[in-house]
Image: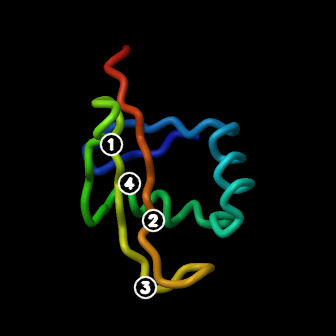
Amino acid sequence: MILEDLFKRNIRLTDERKNHFETNHPEMENQMEKVKETLLNPDIIVRSRTDYQVELFYKHYPVSPVTEKYLCVVVKVSNCG
């Protein structure tokens, strides 16, 4: 699946990663619209302290399947291709 971020970059979400977050974070099941919205309209973007290629997109949601939360979408940016 290809998503887009606010910089118009294509973000590839593999089936394996999608299955990972839906399995290990069951509150994320059926939350793809929030993932897309977070990439397109984050409250803040933070670069990882341990990997300069990783960006963390955060968006606050006053209502979520568990409670009020920040959603963090982690993106590894590669300059390949």
Q: Reading the chain from its start, which is encountered first: label 3 or label 1?
A: 1
Q: Residue 39: give its label.
A: 4
For disc 1, the marked residue is 55
Report if the CB atoms under discs 1 and 4 are less than 8 Å apart.
Answer: no
Q: Position of residue 34 (x, y in %)?
A: 49, 66
The quarter of the rendered structure image containing the N terminus is: top right
Q: Position of residue 40 (x, y in %)?
A: 34, 57
Q: Reading the chain from its start, which is encountered first: label 2 or label 4?
A: 4
Q: CA distance from mark 4 to mark 3?
A: 17 Å
> Label 1 amino acid?
Glu
Q: Position of residue 2 (x, y in %)?
A: 52, 39
Q: Reading the chain from its start, which is encountered first: label 1 or label 4?
A: 4
For disc 3, the marked residue is 62
Tag 4: Cα neighbours inside 10 Å, few (<14), some, or many (≥20)?
A: many
Q: Residue at x 66, y 69 (%)?
A: 27
Question: Can you tell which of label 4 and label 3 is closer to the viewer?
Answer: 3
Question: Can you tell which of label 1 and label 4 is closer to the viewer?
Answer: 1
Q: Reading the chain from its start, which is encountered first: label 1 or label 2?
A: 1
Q: Residue furthest top?
A: 81
Question: Depth check: 61 or 3 in front?
Answer: 61
For disc 2, the marked residue is 71
